[in-house]
Amino acid sequence: NLHYPAIAEGPDYFRVFITYSAQCHILETRWMRNDSIARGSLMNFIRNQRDNGAFVGHIYVNTIQKNGFYHADWGRVVKELHATHPDLAFLKSIYQGLVKYVEYFKAYRDPENSGLYDVLDQFETGQEFMSRYLAVDEMADRYDWINNIRLKGVDATVYIYNLKKTLAWIADKLGEKDDKEKWLESADKTKRAVLHYMWDPEDEMFYDVNPKDFTRTKVKAAVCFYPYLTDIVDDSHIPGLKKHLLDEREFWTTYPVASTSVDDPYFDAYAQWKGKRHNCPWNGRVWPMTNSHIADVLGISARKFNDACLKEKTVEFIEKFIKMMFYDGDVDRPNCYEHYNPFNGKASVYRGVDDYQHSWVVDLYFKYIIGLIPDDDRLVIDPFPFDLNYNIENLRIKGKEISISWNGSKYLVRIDGELFYEGAERIPLTIEL
């Protein structure tokens, strides 16, 4: 079943290919000179796709998980991969599989035809033991891998919105104009539904929706910020982002971000859910997976709206995020556990699961510290104000060799070995490719 090169999620029983973490691996490995791992991280799931269009949750050497499923942001990561390693043949090869995947969501996860999509159990988001599920079923934390709940999830819906937009983009590149218009129309329907049903103008917050009556659940979870990864939001939504995400009484803990708001009745910093310590609780612990999303929420919003405050907070957030993943601040002892305490930054060592490949960090380094923004026909270099020296050499983007260095007083950029820029300051640059 393992037909293409890819990365397992972690040690022990995580040493398998898992959909939720595969999206991370695409972002991390797209900066490699060879993009085979990034492509394989998606191709394995298309190769093992279920008849109904769903992707399996786990791919083992000789079998696949029978009843597992995870949501993932396939649309966004496919576009990001293409930005560094454009490959029209690859886009063509994955198009029908991704179409089938979206059709599965339309058929099985939106019976109301609302444009919003259902979470069917607490495990498939990769984020179990949270208040968000209890809002639609008080027994939700007791069910196993069975589809016993229905919750219009902010994360699930954002992921499918991004995929619809990406399918329109791929269709355009493949010359399928009718398909392009179909996907743009479908994406617009979801965008309007998110703004109408999920956005609360009084609270200035996006919420999950109960499909029984289409009311907002009012449960504040970090996934509620995921629409800021998209073009669903405009500048009118930025005050709400700052109001909630940057509030230490909600998400901006000593080591941000709490996966569930601090003022949630089930919040716990010590991995306890209803008084018992669990393996993977998301009711307040800091998860690198969530942090990677939130780093992009901040960074994308800072750039899109030219917001100096959000740019500063992006720097602060990424620095705290990275420093959290070292034992006692020792640079020779890095770690990456499943989750951490939001107040003291201590890792879940009781789990014994280190080297957990369940987030993206390398991608944040290139996008915000180095400042690389590759697009269809150009490369923008716009570093955030990190107080760090760095040097990268022979990075391959769209077939070009990129080298960039900053030592605090001299900024050098070379393209294919030729000096492109030299100066005493890091300034935004645009390179036509």
Image: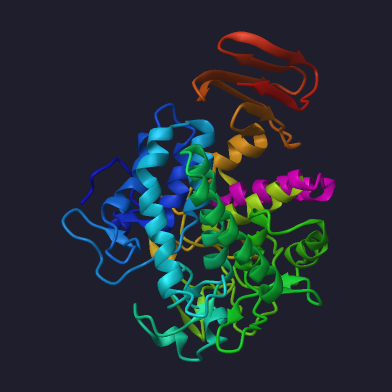
- Magenta-colored stretch includes residue 322: yes
Q: In terms of depth relative to the viewer, which is nearer, 381 or 181? A: 181
Vertical arrangement, residue 432 with respect to residue 84, above or below = above
Residue with the most extreme top position: 418
Counting from the top left corner in percent of width and height, residue 120 is at: 43, 78
Residue with the most extreme bottom position: 138
Vertical arrangement, residue 214 with respect to residue 4, above or below = below
Q: Is residue 103 left or right of residue 381?
A: left
Residue with the most extreme front position: 178
Locate the C terminus and report the quarter of the image it occupies: top right
Counting from the top left corner in percent of width and height, residue 311 is at: 77, 45
Vertical arrangement, residue 189 with respect to residue 274, above or below = above
What residue is at 57 percent from the left and 86 percent from the top?
A: 135
The reply to whether residue 356 is in sight is no
Please identify the quarter of the rendering in which residue 69 is found.
bottom left
Total tally of numbered discs in the picture: 0
Colour pattern: rainbow
Q: Is residue 3 left or right of residue 242?
A: left
What residue is at 75 percent from the left and 72 percent from the top?
A: 249
**Secondary structure of the magenta portion, mostly?**
helix
Q: In terms of depth relative to the viewer, which is nearer, 54 or 184? A: 184
Counting from the top left corner in percent of width and height, residue 386 is at: 72, 37
Counting from the top left corner in percent of width and height, residue 18 is at: 35, 57
What residue is at 73 percent from the left and 71 percent from the top?
A: 205
What residue is at 74 percent from the left and 34 percent from the top?
A: 387
The reply to whether residue 75 is in sight is yes
Q: In terms of depth relative to the viewer, which is nearer, 205 or 127? A: 205
User: Which residues make up the magenta segment?
Assistant: 303-328
- Magenta-colored stretch includes residue 9: no
Vertical arrangement, residue 405 with respect to residue 245, above or below = above
